[in-house]
Amino acid sequence: MPTEITLRLQINGEQVRRIIPANRSLLDFIREDLRLTGSKHGCDVGDCGACTVLVDGAPQLACITLAAECEGAAIRTIEGVTDGGGLHPIQEALHRHVGAQCGYCTPGIVMAMTSLLEADPHPSDSAINEALGSNICRCTGYTKILAAVREVARPGSPS
Amino acid sequence: MTDDRDFHVRAVAEGGVLGGGGRGKVDGLAKITGRSVFVDDLVLPRMVYAKVLRSPHAHAKILSIDASEALAMPGVLKVMTGEDCTARYGAIPVAQDETALALGKVRYIGEPVVCVAAVDEETARDACRRVRVVYEPLDAILSIDDALSADKPFIHEWARKPSNILRKVDQEYGDVDAAFAASDLVLEGTYDYPGSTHVPLETHAALAVPHADGRLTLWSSTQNPHYMHRTIARVLGMRPGDVRVIKPDIGAGYGGKCDTFCTDVCSAWLARALDRPVKFVFEREEVFYAHRGRHRTKMWLKMGMTKEGRVTGIDFKAWAEGGAYASYGVVTSFYLGVFMTMPYKVENYRFQSHRVYTNHPPCGPKRGHGAIQPRFALELHLDRMCEALGLDPVQVRLDNLIEAGHETVNGLLVPSIALSECIERVVQASDYRAKKGSLPPGRGIGLACSAYMCGALHAVYDNDLPHSGVQLKCDRSGRVTIFSGTADCGQGSNHMLAVFVAERLGIDPTDCTVVEADTDLTPVDLGSYSSRVTFMAGNAALQAADRLRSQIASALAAKFKVPVESLVFAGREVRGAWRPIPWLEAVDIAEGHHGTLGSVGSYKPPKIGSRLKRTSVGPSPAYSFTAQVAEVTVDQVSGVVTVDKMWAAHDLGRVLHREIAEGQIEGCVYMGVGEALLEEQAYRKDGVHMTPSILEYRIPTVYDTPEIQVLLVESHDPGGPFGAKEAGEGPQLSTVPAIGNALHDAIGRWLTNPPYTPEKVWKAIKGR
């Protein structure tokens, strides 16, 4: 059996403390131990971005992050993307544009775009591409996702 | 043809729910908040996990399996082998050649051989590694030539008539040779279209739950719950009524989740054996072995044309490499030829296809099933002939188009077509005429057209039953619940059902709850394949909604003493009595008048098309049409091709929801761009998959995806629900040939073997 460790971190604003195997991935920790199933397994090797969460505000691939590395960190998942509930503007825009078809990549994309827009509320197209570049969406061709992000990034201008 | 203004005016006039217009879809909020529930998100008490051990050989006899060491491991509960579940199954009744685990021999590298159930995934995975399987390798069939060779062993030697050819199709209509003799130009060409795979972001997953009364529930990431239901009952030897299949939210399919997989059969068998819930989720690599994607297809095409550009006849042969099992391959062998002449008037047509077995992962239905490859060949060939005759590719296509009411030479009746508008709109939007032949060196523009079906006239098993059923429940809460066996895979069929029902009842789609894809609760629907759902389930939903509306209307007419015909359902009220009756009150009155409210609707396709005698595979109640233009830039030094922009005009009959329809077309174009430039399901000479990961199998990221301009064209199909046709599959057909034709415009070479990798393009530029 792998060594167990005691992990303390903040998840969506809430302090948690769990004893977990030292080799547990952050994604398994979030999904299995905390039952926050919005973050998805797409590849488990960091290729697809479906597991993207924010670690201290920065997007990170939870499937190739050890939970143990996140000791003391503040993690945000799709379940906590807005503080007090309600929709983040990017979620609202994705909904209106139908930026989610099957919805499997969507939580990861919402987190990546949330991080982008919080760091820079008006990102350029190349900054948007860079932030979206690690997230695979196999349904939409990114077109409706980009329209939603551009609308939030540049309100009023045609997307 | 419509523009935004027409569209909104009409939508509002009809009650306002058609169209979309920035209102999302009924299940959209769950998706963007991560609350959609996929199979892997489900956790049940006493649940255990399954994993499989896969074959390291392309073709080998299984001499022995020793699982004693695995079974002795703590936490290991059960080991299952092919001998435990020997009933052969398969998507098509005439080609049932699969078992969930290899039986007696393995037929491809990555084939499941042994399944282990354990208390957690890690233990199950470790235990698989400790199962000893002894193999005797056999000569492997790794190419189409191997499969056609007389000197090779049979992959399915158990069959009554063993052959490595699953199906050969020969059809001839008119007099092709005479047509060629009367042509000004007869051109032959060969084409080699690569295999590719779906890569849905959710891997295949199943969760089987045994019940105290002996029944079984299977949660599966399937596109076809009904066919899954039949298969699981048969393979497990259960009565169909004792099996319940539920498709929760699924992380898309694109055709890749139409079959029954080892996840389904093994979890179901193990759940019964252990009397515990069993979850089985594929790892990403396993999806590349489960495959069922595009058949690599070698093609030979000969076409005749008059000097004015009239197509006189087509002679076409295709050889499709199908992998180790049949899957939908019998259908593929027909789809390779039946849509070939459409959308052009071709009165002389000869077609032959072979769909062969090889020792590779099985191929099956990928978006545009079987029709993608021949469409690529035909549309490139048309441009080649135009070039040889000095004709305009746009005009030649327009001149050869069929019209509404046309029956193709092979018996496909086309009730509606607005392809000429599609062509005109993409040509205009892209400025094709000004750019063709006039762009700077290394840049090019290309056009292609295509046609696709809206569901098959025949189910995969022969029957005279409805293809789609919808049931409605409505009560004094005002809520309308729509029960339907359809399987939303992300294409928006749930929203589509709500739109049809809401539009007819004058309420909002969000006033409806859609209960889908649960064989205990929902009427049969054949599933999400062949682009059938909008057309067929849509018609069933309309019928059910009309019947419910009649119930409500008759109750109101009796109470308010007005003729039924004077009542109008719109804006959450019923108008036409002396005062508008709010929806809630209307339902209340109807429930009081009739008792409990409910209705059913169903759809069975009409028997149309008369000339087609030799096959029931191909005819559809309607066809969608697409015209596309691609503009590309080729880096002459590196051979890297960039698609700068795609214009896609699609005749979808009627727009039911603008963003969903556009999204389907954008998704098609995106997937086509991947097949044109990046993707190939390729194998080493020994049968090992070259790229079984998302990193290596290159699917387009945002950087690889061009700007896509979608133009929606409405032809109002007479049989379609509100005139609608499909939009989620057909548009992919013309993407790759449009890019191929643009590439020729850019570098002056015909590249007949996508994907257009830098190496191939560089060699073409250098004339190597």
Image (cartoon, coloured by chain):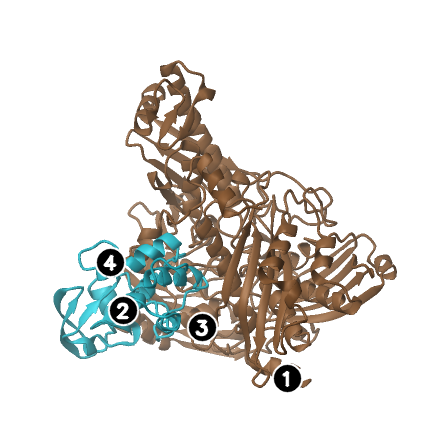
- Element marked by disc 1: helix
- Element marked by disc 3: helix
Residue wearing tag 4: B46
The furthest residue to the top: B561
Q: Nearer the viewer, mark 4 or mark 2?
A: 2
Could you classify mark 2 by the number of other residues whose Cα lies within 10 Å: few (under 14), some (14-19), or many (20 or more)? many
Residue B763: which numbered mark, if any? 1
Residue wearing tag 2: A115
Q: Are marks 1 and 4 on the same chain?
A: yes
Q: What is the tally of numbered marks visible in this picture? A: 4
Specify the amino acid type for callout 1: Lys
Q: Quadrant of residue B313?
A: bottom right
Q: Are marks 2 and 3 on the same chain?
A: no
In the rendered image, which quarter contains the N terminus of chain A? bottom left
Could you classify mark 4 by the number of other residues whose Cα lies within 10 Å: few (under 14), some (14-19), or many (20 or more)? few
Residue B180 relative to residue A152: left or right: right
Residue situated in front as seen by the camera: B294 or B689: B294
Shown in cyan, the chain is A
Disc 4 to disc 3, C-alpha distance: 45 Å
Disc 3 to disc 1, C-alpha distance: 24 Å
Q: Earlier in the sequence, mark 3 or mark 1?
A: 3
Residue wearing tag 3: B703
Residue B244, position as x, y percentages in the image: 38, 47
Shown in brown, the chain is B
Q: Please give the chain letter of the residue carrying mark 2.
A: A
Residue B365: which numbered mark, if any? none
Q: Quadrant of residue B329?
A: bottom right
Q: Earlier in the sequence, mark 1 or mark 4?
A: 4
Residue B480 relative to residue B658: left or right: left
